[in-house]
Image (tube, rainbow, N blue to C red):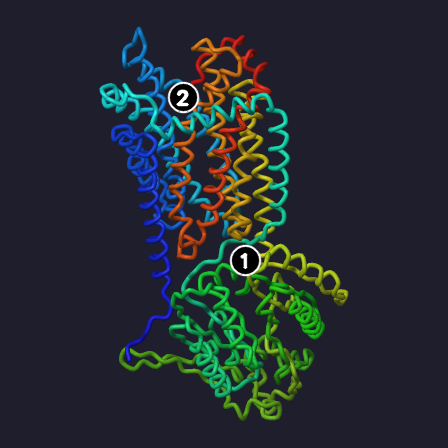
Amino acid sequence: AAPQVLFRQADFITASVDNVTEALRDGTIMVVLVLFIFLLSVRTTLISLLAIPLSLAVTILVFQWLGLSINVMTLGGLAIAIGELVDDSVVDVENILRRLKQNVQSVSPQPVLQVIWRASVEVRSGIVYATAIVILVFLPLFALPGIEGRLFAPLGIAYIVAILASLLVSMTLTPVLCYYLLPKMKQLQQGDSALLKLLKRVQQRWLNWALPKAKLLIAASSTAMLLIAVTVLALPRAFLPAFNEGSLVLGVLFQPGTSLQQANQMGQLAESLLLSVPEVHQVGRRTGRAELDEHAEGVHSSEIDVDLIASDRSRDEVLTEIRQKLSVLPAQVAIGQPISHRLDHLLSGVRAQLAVKVFGDDLDSLRVSAETLRQQLVKVPGLVDVTVEKQVLIPQLAVRLDQAKLAQYGLTPGDASRQLAMLTDGAHITDIIDGVKRYELILRLPEQRRTPGELANVLLNTPAGAIPVSSVAQIEMLDGPNQVNRENGQRRIVIYANSGNVDVSDLLAAVRAIVKDTELPQDSFVSIEGQFLAQEQAMQLLVLLSVLSFSLIFLVLYVRYQSLIFAGIIMCSLPMALTGAVIAMWLTNTALSVASVVGFITLTGIAARNGILKISHYLNLCRHEGEVFSAALVVRGAQERLAPVLMTSMVTAFALVPLLLAADQPGKEILHPVAVVIFAGLLSSTLLDTLLTPLLYWLFGERPTNNWLKQGSDDLM
């Protein structure tokens, strides 16, 4: 029969890239639909959409300049940004269109070029500062170390480059296209669409009812958002979303000393048990590894590659059945995936999500301590595949050299050891070439002569002539460990395990409690490593860097508006966005992982945009259109910003729908938590910002507005 491919990494990579590319394509289609629904004009939609291909083209050129490849994470950055690529142009186009309509209805219309220029300048400040804030919130990504940094830094680069490219397009090409395509539109004679009129009526009624009750409503909303925010601490946690590689790698460990025949029989049984699982397509097994292999193992160790087929059952259900099937084997079984195994190995040196390493000098004590810990760890709910690194006593030759006698014969300990090693382990003499084949010729004693009695009579070469080994050494057969592993020069033994569908933080707390309560010998200590610890460290670093990033955002806003109150009002858009994101994570059972935190980071930058545009518009109305601080100003400013806020938010949100669907597809699994957070956060941010930001401005904005007017500031450019 023809050989069958069990696992090929290229298949997973190709599937991942294809899936994310499809999400990018489908997201673009969603952008087109949402834009047209709001704008109801082919011309305005076309002007806004041109930002997508132009921004992507600039991004690809920058990729080539930076030496970046097109992969899942760079494509993921573009897929997340695809909706935002039109945001700057949408804000520009909407404001220009609104000003052109007002100009047509004016008794003394101004030149079209002047109207377009002033309309574009009017929103320029908000667009530029919103882009600057997006860049600031992404800075923590570039400080992430290790695997998480290598994964998400390319996403951040792709996102930032694309956003900067869209800003460039909106500042240059968009106003020019508006000048040539918009002035002759019949739509300039028409008012708002029926949908927008309805939304404005609803908003006006809300504001007229809410402004007298602003303090009560803000207090109630703040309390609700605070309570929801506190629940973040109770969310399940993980390091990274589980990859869906479509295949598994099973490590099956029998007792050391198991013969090849026995191991092969048990391996065949394991294969038949695996093939009885409906989702298992085919399996392949390797028993043992060669002596010179980097990860040499005896025949008691087997690795089984499992090729899976898609089904309606979840991954956790399939793994649970596999573990149940294999529980009848007299072996320890650890289940992982090819690429995930490599990531685990990079984190802790073992192919498992958790590694509890016991260090010490005495091997017997290490084995006892490890077994004690294992017996406690298997009791932790959700901790699976708990295995102690195999280390058992096997017969070994012990050679004790007599230094004084060696010196008498002019022989060094090193020379004696090398000669004995050559006889027992073998020495490479030469290579035998047979056509294109090459064979190594190894010379060593036959197995029946590698015993203490026989080796004692073997002759050693010395400067004084040949002498028997018994003249300078004592040889005996002792029991010793089958392997002695060291790390940083210290002996260690490892207990490793994986997590089921359980909160990683709870498991880590339980493991730490067990380690703390377990008595160890005086010279021993324990180190906990793996995804568990990496998740905790990454979260701590992200929180610290995010606080720094938000502080910089607040500073930028203060420098621009010269007002702590305005900066504070804009920053209030962040908890409004996080509220929806947290609720969505609970509803979809999405774990708080590095991926979801990246979603939070992205969301804060997007959410701040709406607040910036709204505050800037209030100030421009006061400066250039003679408005004074009043309820009428609050209502007018909110209604005039309603369309661009809704369009930019909905375009960005619905562009992520393809990433929300089929979350377990290769490539999408790591971007799905990002999409969940941003999508839900934008929905809540749009709703709450539309309803609450005008109330915040009404309560706290009068004094800073009057101060800003007294300063005689120029346009918010």
The percent position of residue 149, horizontal first and vertical second, equals 49, 47
Sort mark 2 into few (<14), some (14-19) or many (20+) by Cα contacts within 10 Å.
many
Decide if residue 371 is on the left or right side of residue 698.
right
Q: Position of residue 376 (x, y in %)?
A: 69, 68
Q: Secondary structure at mark 2?
A: helix
Q: Percent x, y for residue 508?
A: 64, 57
Q: Is residue 437 above or below residue 210?
A: below
**What's under tag 1, amino acid-wise?**
Leu
Cβ–Cβ under 8 Å for marks 1 and 2: no
Q: Nearer the viewer, mark 1 or mark 2?
A: 2
Residue in the picture at 34% in, 61% down: 11
Q: Residue 196 versus residue 583: which sits nearer the camera?
A: 196
Q: Is residue 523 above or below residue 20?
A: below
Please state the horizontal and vertical placement of residue 676, each as a whole percent of the image.
47, 46
Of 36 and 302, nearer the camera is: 36
Q: Is residue 317 above or below residue 574?
A: below
Question: Which sits in the foreground, 124 or 206?
Answer: 206
Mark identifier at residue 347: 1
Number of marks drawn: 2
Mark 1 vs mark 2, CA separation in Å: 47 Å
**The quadrant where residue 79 appears:** top left
User: Which residue is rendered at x = 38% and y = 38% of the image?
Assistant: 83
Direction from residue 82 to residue 586 in the image, left or right: right
Give the residue at mark 2.
123
Instruction: Name which residue type carries label 2.
Output: Val
Q: Residue at x 29, y 9 (%)?
A: 109
Quadrant of image for the C terminus: top left
- N-terminal of the pair, mark 1 or mark 2, is 2
Quadrant showing the N terminus? bottom left
